Image (tube, rainbow, N blue to C red):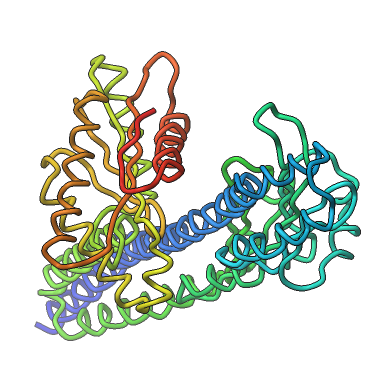
Amino acid sequence: MHRLFNKLKNIFALIIIIIIFASYFGVYIPLKNELEDSLHQGFKNMVSNAEITLENHLNRALEGAESLSSRTMIRRELEKYQAGEINYQELQEYTQPKYEDGAAIHKHLLAAYRFVDDRILANYGGDYLELLANNGFLESEADNLLVTADQRYIIVKSSILTDAGNRLGSDYIIYDLNAILSELRQLNPEEIDYNILRGEPVLNSGIKADKIIEIRELNNTDYFLQAETSASLIYDTIGRISYKIILVVLLTVLAIAFLVTKVLHNTSKNIVKNLRKELKEKTILSETDKMLGIYNRAKFNQELEREIDRVKRYKSKLSLIMIDIDYFKEFNDNYGHHVGDQILKKIVSIVEEKIRKHDILARYGGDEFMIICPETSLKDAEKLAQRLNEAIDYYNCSEDNNLSCSFGVAEFNKDQDDIKSLIKRADQALYKAKDTGRNRVCEN
């Protein structure tokens, strides 16, 4: 009996050892790897949101400079000066107040200068002439965008041109990059450092010593966004969770050896299920605008690429509608951002009520929306945009509001277009609607 007991004891000990090894290699290691992948992907998603936000700011900086340089009334007066119809003082008296009004509406703008005949015709904001000189902007002939080496400013040069393309002068716009980078940091609960690099980066994305680095190329620029975070933010969390799990497993094995395999199997299955659920929820959050509940810009780009691939395969039609709320900034300034948020939600509800189930609505920017219209020609997309415009007008009449939207419509040309050119043409049509009086639909 004693011999049998010892034999059973040895067999029991062997079973425990086998279960411990099986638990370690079959549960702990796979679970640890899945946690690492999940948290690392979460970091990448945060960087993607920051990348989209920064690209949006850079694009708006370029668009803001271009819109400031192309203001028709001031440009016409400048042409009169060039033709000798008015003198420099008259030109300056006319330009200065209107230039200040135009510059004041741009977010994060620190200063703006208009140079004509190598003299400052008009200006807005603080004194940054030395900054322009130190960065060689005053001697440069070409229009360009520059991020200063100290990561504090964005400088944009935009030429003032006649309709014939002759150069009348130049605008120099300086934006507060510190404020933009602060916005990026506020997007993430973790400590992530952002740097903007010019030219090909020295490092590559990945884990470097005690840091995790992610590098993204910024569209339409020669700049890169580099994001860094401490590896301990991810791996310390994994370590704490993993050690607790293995401790529970060991205690369970020592308490009930016979049931440990089933308990471990169920535990690992539930944990993996929860991880997948959490990963799915994070994926939905990374694809959805939190306030409006519709797709965000990153998901819009993904869906548009998928629809373009389908058009190329099946030779079907595809159109894009771009929507911008007229004078939205004035609503925010006059009534507060909570009223602006309600306007955004109302626009979304009106649009969702009118579009088809397979049309895709996404928030492209602050007050800009995109509708992807599969199997839709330019003519039908324009009709849909007109219906949306009428629905908003009807809402205005019933609620006594002064809300309106401008619409830009473009159809995909499989022989000439890609995703960027299609968006650009819709954007051009939208600007045409803005320039011709707003509250209308224009096509490209």
Q: Residue at x 37, y 62 (%)?
A: 29
Is residue 436 shown left or right of residue 183? left
On the image, which quarter does residue 260 sit in?
bottom left
Apparent side of residue 331 relative to residue 291 in the rendered image (left or right): right
Quadrant in which the C terminus appears: top left
Q: Residue at x 58, y 69 (%)?
A: 229
Give the residue displayed 79% in from the left and 42% down from the top: 85
Q: Quadrant of residue 70?
A: top right
User: Looking at the picture, how far across and down is residue 163, in whole percent?
Assistant: 65, 30
5 horizontally vs 13: left or right: left
Quarter of the rendering occupied by the N terminus: bottom left
Q: Is residue 386 above or below residue 263?
A: above
User: Outermost residue, front direction?
Assistant: 85
Would residue 202 be seen by someone viewing this image from the given angle? no
**Nearest to the observer: residue 123 or residue 110:** 123
- Disc tally is 0
Q: Nearer the viewer, residue 35 or 51?
A: 51
The x, y position of residue 192, in whole percent, is 56, 70
Residue 217 placement: quadrant? top right
Residue 232 spot, x, y in % from top left: 54, 74
Q: Which of 327 and 189 lies nearest the eye of the viewer? A: 327
Say if 115 sits above or below 108 in the image.
Answer: above
Residue 23 seen in the figure: yes
From the viewer's side, name the closer residue of 205 and 379.
379
Q: Residue at x 21, y 79 (%)?
A: 253
Q: Is residue 20 above or below residue 172?
A: below
